[in-house]
Image (cartoon, coloured by chain):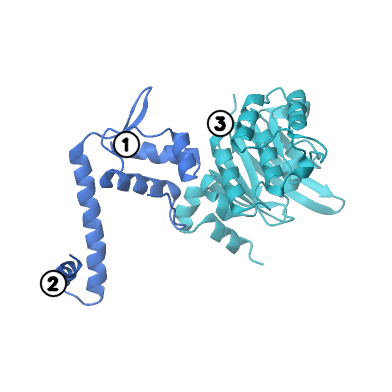
């Protein structure tokens, strides 16, 4: 069994003449929480969408838990997109049924437990929820799967600090040594303490890929400050 | 005590310092059982692997020991805790001394200042 949840080599994505990813080599170890950090338009979401099987790469190879991207990997990838994909007219229970139908690794009781802890009425429609609640429900759904790799695209953008704490606690609480968690964000200071490794992406290229504590030790600065330096406008 | 981390040092070394402080202050009693790695990671809002690494370092220094099935415990060796306290106190005093020296005070003057201020404090 490979120690890696994901391995990609020379991953390229072109949209017409624009190169969104310029030959990325990356590997994520099982049991690690990885921060995918970069400004808007750096290629983070493109990378995640390719991993999730929503986009096809132009060149290069990518394997997740030793499988090529396809039906098999969809079953072991749990993906939280940047934008909500639950219909306004759906209730929480509808979403749970949806996940139960599509994902054999969905742990219904775990989800219900987490919803109960937040006092969320499962009969509530998404339409009636605040943005923060919607984000929390989505995160609960995604983290209630027993996947091999979790991709959380901007899970803390646009929610208040209390909701951010909830997101962070949920990620730590659901830590699984056999799975990797990949979090893309530009709000680094809020999450850098929960990361093992960080990957800085700039214009479709990796400019840094290292362990958080090693970076702090070497540079004597936080990842957040380093980010501001690397991506200074 | 609450978990707070400064930005300029590795997180695991700060966790080690924090736990050592809790041992010295008696917040963690000798022989007391620690929470699980995950629970401690949640409380500190840090990565579980980082917490694990810090606890392993403390274990190497024998300030923490683990029983195979029942978890991790604070050392029962009171001498060791006293030593830890003494070395912490020494470091604080040395830092303090360096600062006082840099403003031109001699050891004797520092002691006089300390006595005067302690006298006023009651």
Q: Which residue is drawn at 77% across and 26% down?
A: A102
Palette colour of chain B: blue
Q: Mark 2 lies on which chain?
A: B
The answer to which quarter of the image holds residue B99 is: bottom left
Residue A202's tag is none
List the residue tagged with mark 3.
A176
How far apart marks 2 and 1 lie (CA) works out to 41 Å
Same chain check for tags 1 and 3: no
Determine whether the residue tagged by mark 1 lies in a helix, strand or loop.
helix
Q: In which quadrant is the C terminus of chain A drawn?
A: bottom right
- Which is nearer the eye, B120 or B111? B120
How far apart marks 2 and 3 lie (CA) works out to 57 Å
How many numbered discs? Answer: 3
Q: Can you give x and y, in whole percent of width and height, for residue A174 in the image?
A: 57, 34
Q: In which quadrant is the N terminus of chain A drawn?
A: top right
In the rendered image, the residue lying farthest to the right is A16
In the rendered image, the residue lying farthest to the bottom is B104
Determine whether the residue tagged by mark 3 lies in a helix, strand or loop.
loop
Q: Which chain carries label 3?
A: A
Determine whether the residue tagged by mark 2 lies in a helix, strand or loop.
helix
Position above or below: B92 against A170 = below
- Which is nearer the eye, A20 or B70? B70
Query: Is disc 1 surrounded by few (<14), some (14 to 19) or many (20+) residues within 10 Å?
Result: few
Same chain check for tags 2 and 1: yes
Q: Can you give x and y, in whole percent of width and height, for residue B92 in the image?
A: 25, 59
Whichever of callouts 2 and 1 sits on the residue coming sooner in the sequence is 1
Residue B112's tag is 2
List the residue tagged with mark 1.
B60
């Amino acid at each position: 069994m490979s120690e890696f949840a994901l391995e990609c080599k020379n991953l390229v994505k072109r949209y017409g003449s624009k190169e969104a990813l310029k030959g990325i080599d990356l590997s994520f170890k099982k049991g690690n929480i990885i921060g995918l950090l970069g400004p808007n338009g750096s290629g983070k979401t493109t990378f995640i969408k390719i991993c999730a099987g929503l986009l096809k790469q132009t060149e290069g190879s990518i394997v997740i838990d030793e499988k090529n991207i396809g039906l098999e990997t969809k079953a072991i990838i749990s993906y939280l997109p940047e934008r909500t994909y639950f219909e306004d007219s759906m209730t929480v229970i509808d979403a749970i049924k949806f996940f139960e139908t599509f994902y054999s690794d969905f742990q219904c009781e775990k989800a219900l437990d987490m919803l109960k802890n937040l006092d969320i009425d499962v009969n509530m429609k998404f339409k009636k929820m605040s943005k923060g609640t919607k984000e929390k429900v989505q995160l609960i759904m995604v983290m209630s799967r027993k996947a091999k790799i979790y991709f959380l695209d901007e899970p803390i953008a646009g929610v208040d600090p209390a909701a951010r704490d909830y997101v962070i606690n949920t990620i730590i609480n659901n830590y699984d040594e056999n799975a990797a968690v990949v979090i893309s964000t530009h709000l680094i200071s809020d999450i850098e303490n929960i990361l093992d490794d960080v990957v800085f992406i700039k214009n479709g290229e990796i400019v840094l890929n290292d362990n958080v504590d090693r970076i702090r030790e070497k540079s004597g600065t936080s990842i957040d400050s380093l980010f501001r330096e690397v991506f200074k406008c | 005590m609450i978990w707070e981390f400064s930005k300029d040092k590795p997180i695991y070394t700060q966790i080690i310092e924090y736990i050592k402080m809790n041992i010295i202050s008696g917040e963690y009693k000798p022989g007391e059982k620690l929470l699980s790695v995950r629970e401690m990671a949640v409380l500190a809002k840090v990565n579980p692997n980082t917490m694990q690494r810090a606890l392993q370092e403390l274990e190497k220094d024998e300030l923490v020991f683990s029983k195979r099935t029942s978890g991790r415990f604070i050392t029962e060796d009171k001498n060791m805790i006293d030593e830890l306290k003494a070395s912490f106190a020494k470091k604080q005093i040395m830092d303090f001394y360096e600062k006082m020296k840099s403003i031109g005070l001699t050891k004797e003057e520092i002691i006089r200042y300390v006595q005067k201020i302690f006298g006023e404090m009651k």
